[in-house]
Amino acid sequence: MDGGQMFLVGMGLLTVAVVVGVGLKVGELELRQEKENRWYRERAHVVTDSSEMLRGLQAKRAEGAEKE
């Protein structure tokens, strides 16, 4: 192998390393985003359940006030 071929092999290996590194970083960011989305979805259920419970209590209170 002469110098030019060695240079091309080196550049090819460097390119592969960069592509793999970027792919790993993108995968890590996607996992983090999925975790955050899951966390927000879980909190949305809690807020929705709390809001429904509050509306139910307000309706019961209104019914109680109407009966008196």
Image (cartoon, rainbow, N blue to C red):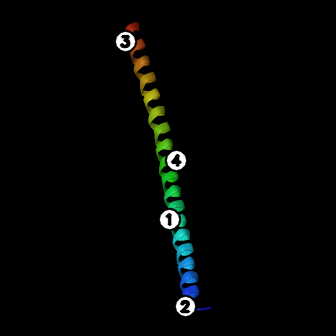
Do we see residue 68 in this rendering? no
Q: Residues under labels 1 and 4: Cα distance?
A: 20 Å
The disc, 1 or 4, on the residue closer to the chain's N-terminal end is 1
Amino acid marked by disc 1: Lys
Q: Is residue 19 left or right of residue 1?
A: left
Q: Amino acid at mark 2?
A: Gly
* Disc nearer the start of the sequence (4/2): 2
Callout 2–callout 3 Cβ contact below 8 Å:
no
Q: Nearer the viewer, mark 2 or mark 1?
A: 2
The residue carrying pointer 4 sits among few (fewer than 14), some (14 to 19) or many (20 or more) residues within 10 Å by Cα, namely few
Mark 3 or 4, nearer chain start: 4
Q: Which one is in front in this view, the residue at disc 1 or the one at disc 4?
A: 1
User: What residue is drawn where x is 42% and y is 27%?
Assistant: 54
Q: Which mark is residue 65?
A: 3
Sequence-wise, the earlier of marks 3 and 1 is 1
Residue count near mark 3 (Cα–Cα under 10 Å), binned few <14, some 14–19, many ≥20: few
Give yes or no for contact between labels 1 and 4 (Cβ–Cβ under 8 Å): no
The residue that label 2 is drawn on is 3
SS for tag 1?
Answer: helix
- The answer to whether any part of residue 19 appears in the image is yes
